[in-house]
Image (tube, coloured by chain):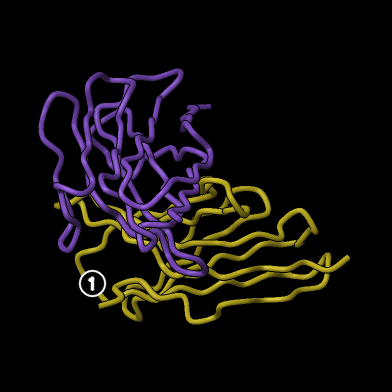
Chain colours: A yellow, B purple
Amino acid sequence: DQQVKQNSPSLSVQEGRISILNCDYTNSMFDYFLWYKKYPAEGPTFLISISSIKDKNEDGRFTVFLNKSAKHLSLHIVPSQPGDSAVYFCAASASNTGKLIFGQGTTLQVKP
Amino acid sequence: GAVVSQHPSWVICKSGTSVKIECRSLDFQATTMFWYRQFPKQSLMLMATSNEGSKATYEQGVEKDKFLINHASLTLSTLTVTSAHPEDSSFYICSASPGTMEETQYFGPGTRLLVL
């Protein structure tokens, strides 16, 4: 049972344009959401997070949007840069368990 | 920023041998450490949660006698894959949390295990 889903395995974007990565979840108990960036053969690096009491969190070029009614969150990267090319994982946790549940990841390629 | 190291970064072993992977928090004390496993093109799957000085909590479907976890100190956790088989070949990643808020996790670089 995949509680966190990233339905797009890959995304290709032109440099300078916006990258939008999507994530859906099924567990209504999730109250904290995170995005991680991962390069091959490396551990994930934390990018940005959002609490369920908010619907938007912005940090530089990265913005995460949360739509609780739709159980959907998205990561916007603008402008996209070639160095952003990596695998992006969304993760969710419920405060009563604290565990992180990861999506399958989306491979982003930003073309120069 | 918080740094977590793993050793070794990759290991090749024969079927039936045991392999130990170390996870260290270098500049903070980790109350909780987590072990994940990632198959190619799949998500990170939590294997177990360990708290210093207590037994690890394993996720459903993870054999505790096969994947031995020891969290001996606030900066070191080890995962031992006992009697490894080719199906254990995977990318193992640890993470460490400095407090009780598990969402604040810092990940190690991962260990790639290949069992021949």
> In the picture, which quadrant includes the C terminus of chain B?
bottom left
Q: Tell which residue pokes out farthest to the left in this image.
A: B54
- Circle 1 residues within 10 Å: few <14, some 14–19, many ≥20: some
Please report the residue visible at 30 percent of the width from the left and 32 percent of the height from the top: B78
- Mark 1 = which residue? A27
User: Which of these two is toward me, A10 or A33?
Assistant: A10
Residue B77 at x, y percent in the picture: 30, 29
Please report the residue visible at 57 percent of the width from the left and 54 percent of the height from the top: A37
Residue A76 at x, y percent in the picture: 61, 65
Q: Quadrant of residue B35?
A: top left
Residue B90 at x, y percent in the picture: 43, 56
User: Which of these two is toward me, A46 or B93?
Assistant: B93
Residue A34 at x, y percent in the picture: 43, 55
**Is residue A87 in sight in this rendering?**
yes
Identify whether A7 is placed above or below B25: below
From the viewer's perspective, is A36 left or right of A54?
Answer: right
**Is residue A53 in sight in this rendering?**
no
Kind of element beneath mark 1 = loop
Please report the residue visible at 66 percent of the width from the left and 76 percent of the height from the top: A11
User: Which of these two is toward me, A1 or A94?
Assistant: A1
> Given the image, what chain letter belongs to the residue carrying mark 1?
A
Give the number of callouts: 1
Callout 1, which amino acid? Asn
Identify whether A8 is placed above or below A32: below
Q: Quadrant of residue A107?
A: bottom right
From the viewer's perspective, is B114 left or right of A82?
Answer: left
Please report the residue visible at 76 percent of the width from the left and 74 percent of the height from the top: A13
Identify whether A78 is placed above or below A26: above
From the viewer's perspective, is B47 left or right of B42?
Answer: left
